[in-house]
Amino acid sequence: MADLLTHGAVAVLVKASTGWRRPAVFVAGTLLPDVASRVPSIGLGLVHVHLMRLPEWMLFAWEPLHQPFGMALLAYLLAMLFPVAIRVSIFTNLLGGMALHLGLDLMQSHHGAGYMLAFPFDMGSFELGWIGSEATVPFALPLCLLAFWYGKRRQQSFSVLKKDE
């Protein structure tokens, strides 16, 4: 949970401070790697333990969606669900959010698990291990709120300028 808060808060911070378009898609991009890989694994793990035995591959088949190749594939597939006119924007925002997710995760310590950056071509893992995922929440949330306030204030300033024209 703390990891999702961190990713979402930093994504809002980035979008509010830059004023780029489609902030909701960008924020969704930062959350998707965890949601697409962890939620099915957790749900199927519960089925495996409490209801019926499932093949092992079924429990871990979602893990590639938390690696760069899987993120790019997921962003592409999701962008194809949108009208042609906005697909590139959707894809770049999703992929940008996923890249931010990857950058934040690479800084964190995952107790040796790390990221397989070159999957499926290489199975070696990498992480910097500078911080724990929970350590960033107390800093990211206030910064997110500040950036959100700044973005709203900036938007109001622009609307006042347009009224004066």
Image (cartoon, rainbow, N blue to C red):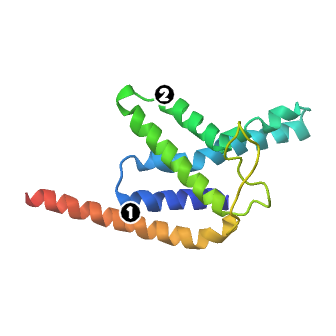
How dense is the environment of label 2, judged by Cα within 10 Å: few (below 14), some, or many (20 and up)? some
The quarter in which the N terminus is drawn is bottom right
Q: Is 33 placed above or below 48 here?
A: below
Q: Residue 158: x and y, percent?
A: 21, 60
The answer to whether mark 2 and mark 1 are in CB contact below 8 A is: no
Which label is found at residue 17? 1
Q: For the residues marked 2 and 1, what is the alpha-carbon distance in whole angstroms?
A: 28 Å
Q: Please state which amino acid type lies under the numbered disc 1.
A: Ser
Q: Secondary structure at mark 1?
A: helix
Q: Residue 18: x and y, percent?
A: 36, 59
Q: Is residue 67 left or right of residue 9?
A: right
Q: Is residue 165 left or right of residue 75?
A: left
Which label is found at residue 81? none
Which label is found at residue 80? 2
Dot placed on the residue nearer the N-terminal end, 2 or 1: 1
Q: Is residue 154 left or right of residue 103?
A: left
Q: Please state which amino acid type lies under the numbered disc 2.
A: Met
Q: What's the residue at 58%, 56% (across, down)? A: 103
